[in-house]
Structures are given as structure tokens and as C-alpha cells.
Image (cartoon, rainbow, N blue to C red):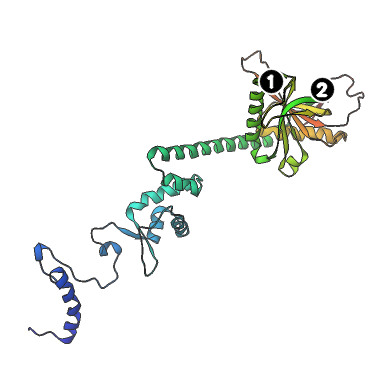
Amino acid sequence: MDALSPRRRERRLPCSGLAAARGGVGSREGGTDVGPLITRAVPWSEQTGDMAIRLSIGDFSRMTYLSVKALRRYHDMRLLEPAHIDRFTGYRYYDASQVPLGQAIRRFRDLEMPLEQLKDVLHAPDASARNKLIIAHLEHMESALQQTQQTVASLRALLEQPHAPIAVEYRSVAAATAIAISEPVHRGDLAAWWSEALDELHQVLASSSAVRAGSDGALYPNEFFEEELGEVVAFIPVADMPTPAGRPQLIEIPGAELAITVHNGAISELDQTYGALGTFVAEREIGVQGPIREHYVVNSNEASAEPVHHTEVCWPVFHTKGPESDDGQPHTAPSP
């Protein structure tokens, strides 16, 4: 009974070393059972006992709806790092406590938050800084949603509503001195650039002794439309303007013969007015080379205390007075 078979001695010997270090295999030293050496493949949670539950990358993917490819990328970016990497196999393991974080990351990505911005959110020093970043992105999303809604409404109107005729006026405009900002502008950046440029011109004019001599305006060269990049000029006609400092400069806006119509709708529908006026000019074969002009006219409204803003779209033309223009009245042309 005391002797062990060779096979049993072979299986017992490894445990005896562990017993010496831990107080004996199967002993109850200090009232605690010591289990046998683990020699089989078991889940991580069984190997670590009371430690945090570890998840394979596949399990973590299923729990968070983040693909394995995305998780590897997030690891490389230090956006979402595994809790453990097996040094022999290279396998990634995650804590169950990381699941809510992975789910939050997926929601931020569903909101199209850029990865670098998302990294800033996750690494923010405090809740206030983190919330500020999140609110900024939500405001960006709300603005994008509003733009999408406007585009949808514009497309619906384009498809469903008949086009009203436009009134076209011929006007000869003399050359004028203006305070202006002239810079290369990409079409996608026009709205922000236009607003900033005119605001700056208004401030310079208000702080000077100059007198306004006309409505705000802008010149758009052919390249701006054809190549989506061109030298756009925002200007305000002035008189007695001293030479300004900084970005604004004094220039002469050249005179021109123009076919003009008024756009009263949303900016998103301005292209329809361009199309109607361009058709009017093309049908009469009177178009000439030169920038398209826009004049931003402000009129008083008797029914409201708020001023009414109109955009005059001005197409350069070669025009000789004839029967159709001798009366000096606007001419009506159907929209395309």
C-alpha cells in the first residue's frame, strides 16, 4: 500500500515540488484547500480564479458589435487596448469591464466621430473636458442634419413644384471703388469664408470715416465653378476710404453690362436661379466672359421690423438697347 507504481510516482513527482512551496498538495494548511496543478486547456476565467473575467477578441467582438479588424485597429491607435496579450500566441484578451467602453465607442463611430477626436474624448482629463468635446460633435451632427433636411426639401421642391418665371433686368454698372478681400476659395469653404470676409469688411468700414456707396457684393470667376477653386472677391463700394491695413484692400470693381435677376429663396436653391438666368442669357446668345456678380441688397419691410435680404444674381452680357429693352422694364423669362 505504501509503494507507488512507477507510473504513479511519475505523475506525483511534479506535485511534490508544488506542495513544498504551497504547503502540500491537497493539504488544509491554515484551513485552505490547495488545488492540483492545472494541466489542461481551460477558460481564462477558470485559470484566474477570482480575477476579472477575460474575453477572447472574438467574444468581445460579439458583445460590442465591433469587428475584429476594428478592434485590432483601435489597439494599434491605443484607443481601446486589450487587458492582456498572450506572449506566446499574441492573442488579445479583454476584460468584461471593457464591454461598456467598446459599446460606447461603437455609438460614437455610428455618429461619425473621427477616430482622433474619439481618442481625445476617451483620454480627456476630466468629465468637463470630455463633455465639451462630445457636445461640440453633437452640434456638428445637428448642423449636418439640418443641412441634409434642407437639401431633401430643396430636391423635393425641384421635383414636385413647377418653376415660376423669373424677371430679368438689363443694367449698366459703372466702375466703382470698393474695400475688398480677394482670396482663392474652394467651393466647399465658400459659406464660411464669405461670412467671415464680409464681417471683417463691415468692421473696417464702421471704424473708418468712409461712406458706403452701394450694396455688399462678390465676384465669382469661371474657375470657381468649373474647377471648384477660384479667386473670389467680397467687396463693399465706398467713397473717401483711407487705405486700410491688413487683409482688406482698396480696389476698383470694373464696370459691366449685366443681366440681373433676384433670388429670394434659400441659399441651397441659388443654383436654380443661376440656371434660369443662364438659360435666359444663352437663348439670346448675349453672354460674354467675366465673373458672375452677386449683390446683397437689404430692403425695409413695411409688414415687419426685420430687414429683407435679397441676392441679385448678375450675368455679364453684351447688350445693345433695342425694342425689348427700350421701355426700361424687367423682362420675364420662364425657368428651365
Which image quarter: residue 144?
top right
Which secondary structure, mark 1? strand
**As rendered, which of 44 and 290 lies closer to the eye?**
290
Q: Which residue, as the protein is rendered here, is positioned at the far top? A: 302
Which secondary structure, mark 2? loop
Please determine whether, in this image, residue 73 is positioned above or below residue 204. below
**As rendered, which of 198 and 306 lies closer to the eye?**
198
Dot 2, crowdedness within 10 Å: few (<14), some or many (≥20)?
some
| Residue at the image position 92 percent from the left and 23 percent from the top | 323
Q: Tell how many labels.
A: 2
Question: Where is residue 4 drawn, in percent x and y?
Answer: 12, 84
Please determine whether, in this image, residue 126 is positioned above or below residue 299. below
Horizontal placement of 301 versus 132: left or right? Answer: right
Horizontal placement of 59 versus 261: left or right? Answer: left
Question: Where is residue 45 drawn, in percent x and y?
Answer: 28, 61
Please determine whether, in this image, residue 238 is positioned above or below residue 33. above
On the question of residue 237 being in view, the answer is yes
Which image quarter: residue 299?
top right
Quarter of the figure with the N terminus? bottom left
Gap between marks 2 and 1, in whole Å? 20 Å
Badge 2 amino acid: Pro
> Which comes before the other along the chain, label 2 or label 1?
1
Dot 1, crowdedness within 10 Å: few (<14), some or many (≥20)?
few
Badge 1 amino acid: Val
Quarter of the figure with the C terminus? top right
On the question of residue 168 being in view, the answer is no
**As rendered, which of 172 and 65 lies closer to the eye?**
172
Residue under label 2, please give it: 330
Question: Where is residue 178 drawn, in percent x and y?
Answer: 75, 26
Residue under label 1, please give it: 298
**As rendered, which of 162 and 143 lies closer to the eye?**
143
